[in-house]
Amino acid sequence: MPRKVLQLDGGFNFRDLGGYPSAQQTTVKWHRLMRAAHLANLTAADCQQLEDLGFKLVVDLRSTAEAQQFPDQLGPQMRRVHLPVFDNDETESAASTAQIQRLFARDPLGGIIACCASIVA
């Protein structure tokens, strides 16, 4: 079975959605659908690896502000379609490191700690 996480030098949280069952009682094919964080730090080698796997289209669901703050780096054979889920960034992803630290300083159970606490509580 292929690995779920795709190792890229400048890619963050790339995951292959292959192998998951579909509503039609089939499975998603490997290396056909990926999910990732922003693509702003992809290297030329990363882009080549994605193109070699056959990826040609990036559907960007981020807000316009986040997409402008962290513009995608794509290979020459790849194109981007921007379909924002939110008009405004509804997450902390567009915030600065200092803003995030201030947020979590006020809420010590914020972020991943709160997520994990809700799982084990």
Image (spheres, rainbow, N blue to C red):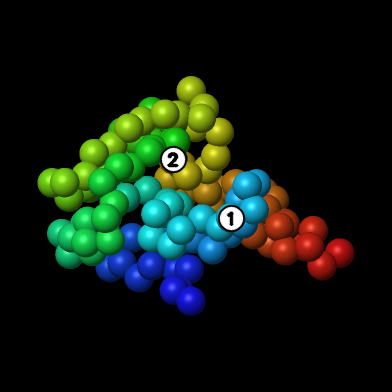
**Residue 64 horizontal/vertical position (percent):** 38, 28
**Residue 30 horizontal/vertical position (percent):** 43, 62
Give the mark nearer the N terminus: 2 vs 1: 1
Whole-angstrom CA distance, mark 2 to mark 1, is 37 Å
Q: Where is mark 2, residue-wise?
A: 94
Q: Residue furthest front?
A: 25
Say which amino acid is labelled 2. Ala
Which one is nearer the viewer's eye here, 13 or 81? 81
Which residue is drawn at the image coordinates 82% and 67% (left, top)?
120
Which residue is drawn at the image coordinates 56% and 57% (left, top)?
27
Residue 17's label in the rendered image is none
**Residue 105 horizontal/vertical position (percent):** 63, 53
Task: Between label 2 and label 1, give the one nearer the viewer.
Answer: 1
Q: Residue furthest right?
A: 121
- SS state under label 1: loop
Which residue is drawn at the image coordinates 33% and 60% (left, top)?
11
Residue 105 is at least partly visible in this image: no
